[in-house]
Image (tube, helix red, strand yellow):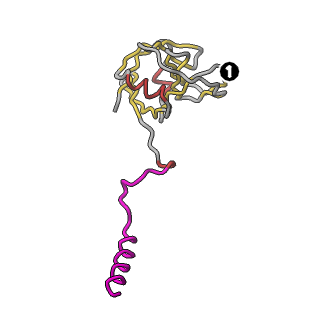
Amino acid sequence: MKRALLLLVLLSTYSLIPAKASGPVRAGELRPMKIIMTINHQSYEIALADNATAKAFVQQLPLTMTMAELNGNEKFADLPAALNNDPHKPGTIQQGDVMLYGNKTLVLFYETFQTSYSYTPIGKVLSTDSLKKSVGEGGINVRFTRP
């Protein structure tokens, strides 16, 4: 009887010890995979979308592209290889969105605006404070790398 009581006390005490911080991740704590985009020596972190298209895009890295200007709100370039896509109409494009148009055209948006076009999300630039200034007017050279 004493052994059973001692065992019960020990187990109760052990259950009060906090679990390791490396335990299971809760949904609200998920950290998205990130890549780095560099424009004119200015680096930007991009949080990748949780989809097959973003994962396939990462497989093409490192990647340097010359992106052309379009409509005063975006830069675009064709990828070396097509990606599977799952396009939808976002309605509103946000500054910093990185999307796939069709199955091969990468688009970086540097303005927020309404659209009726369909895109597959790839990621989002985390800090857009200087993005518009960095992309400037006309074509730009952009490098995408893993951290």
103 left or right of 38 in image? right
Above or below 71: residue 30: below
Instruction: Tell which residue pokes out farthest to the bottom in this image.
Output: 2
Q: Quadrant of residue 44?
A: top left
In the rendered image, the quadrant that contains the C terminus is top left
Residue bearing mark 1: 116
Residue at (52%, 16%) from the top-left corner?
103
Can you give x and y, in whole percent of width and height, for residue 48 in the image? 46, 32
Is residue 108 or residue 89 the one in the foreground? Answer: 89
Q: Quadrant of residue 66?
A: top left
Magenta span has 129? Answer: no
Can you give x and y, in whole percent of width and height, for residue 16 in the image? 39, 71
Can you give x and y, in whole percent of width and height, for residue 10 in the image? 34, 77
User: How many residues crowd mark 1 within 10 Å: few (<14), some (14–19), many (20+)?
Assistant: few
Residue at (39%, 31%) from the top-left corner?
35
Is residue 67 or residue 147 the one in the foreground? Answer: 147
Q: Secondary structure at mark 1?
A: loop
Magenta span has 23? Answer: yes
Instruction: Tell which residue pokes out farthest to the front in this image.
Output: 1
Give the residue type at disc 1: Ser
Residue at (68%, 21%) from the top-left corner?
116
Can you give x and y, in whole percent of width and height, for residue 129 in the image? 50, 33
Above or below 59: residue 30: below
Residue at (38%, 79%) from the top-left corner?
8
In the rendered image, the quadrant that contains the N terminus is bottom left
In the image, the segment drawn in magenta is 1-26
